[in-house]
Amino acid sequence: MPKRYFQDLRREFGPDCEVMTVTGPDGRLLSSVMSFYFRDEVLPYYAGDDEAARDLAANDFKYWELMRRACARGLAVFDYGRSKQGTGSFSFKKNWGFEPQQLHYEYCLYKRDAVPQNNPSNAKYKLLIETWRRMPIGMANWLGPFVVRSLG
């Protein structure tokens, strides 16, 4: 998404939106998360990591620090968001001790017989995902918005 989108979110949500970034010993940006606060909850929503973050456990530190800060603020809920069972995100969250809660969806289908399966585990997207991973970042950033519109 464009940088402007994230700037707009920060401006709109003000103090209820926070960006936390973990840097390496050399000052290099490793891992960031944009979180939103509401009542007694924090929701880490947008996150990203540099490849070097893995070797330094920057992602783990990022969430540990966010949880620590949430506790210091007296917040009661750390909403890690939704993840599909069997995915890496689901395992990562469970590893932190979070217990899954079943959340139900309601769909209203227009011009369809079934809910679209727009997710990485859909075999239909395997070739696209493999190609995307090998694509230069500049091309992926340029092409991304056009691809997303056609997924539905």
Image (cartoon, helix red, strand yellow):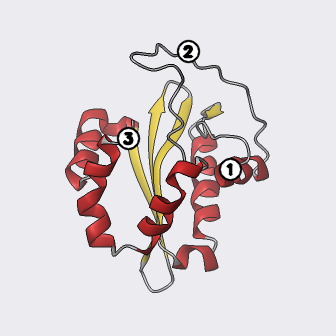
Q: Is residue 56 visible?
A: no
Residue matched to label 3? 17
| Label 1 Cα crowd, 10 Å radius (few <14 / some 14-19 / many 20+) | few
Q: Residue furthest bottom?
A: 26
Any mark on residue 106, and which?
2
At which x and y percent is residue 17?
A: 38, 41
Q: Position of residue 26 (x, y in %)?
A: 45, 86
| Residue carrying label 1 | 87
Which is more N-terminal, label 3 or label 2? 3
Q: Which residue type carries mark 1?
A: Thr
**Mark 1 touches mark 2? (CB < 8 Å):** no
| Relative horizontal placement of residue 106, taking residue 89 as reference (left or right) | left
Give residue 44's position: percent from left, percent from top: 51, 44
Side of 148 relative to 62 (left or right): left
The correct choice, above or below, for 68 with respect to 61 in the image is above
| Mark in front: 2 vs 3 | 2
Front residue of 22 and 73: 22
The image quarter containing residue 3 is: bottom left
Foreground residue among 46 and 134: 134
Number of numbered discs on residues: 3
Secondary structure under tag 2 reads loop
> Mark 3 falls on what kind of element?
strand
Residue 8 in the image: above or below residue 55: above
Q: Position of residue 105 (x, y in %)?
A: 58, 20
Residue drawn at x 75%, y 51% as measured from the top left: 96
Q: CA distance from mark 2 to mark 3?
A: 28 Å
Counting residues from the start of the chain, the first of labels 1 and 3 encountered is: 3
Q: Amino acid at mark 3?
A: Cys
Q: Residue at x 74, y 51 (%)?
A: 91
- Looking at the rendered structure, the kind of residue marked 2 is Glu
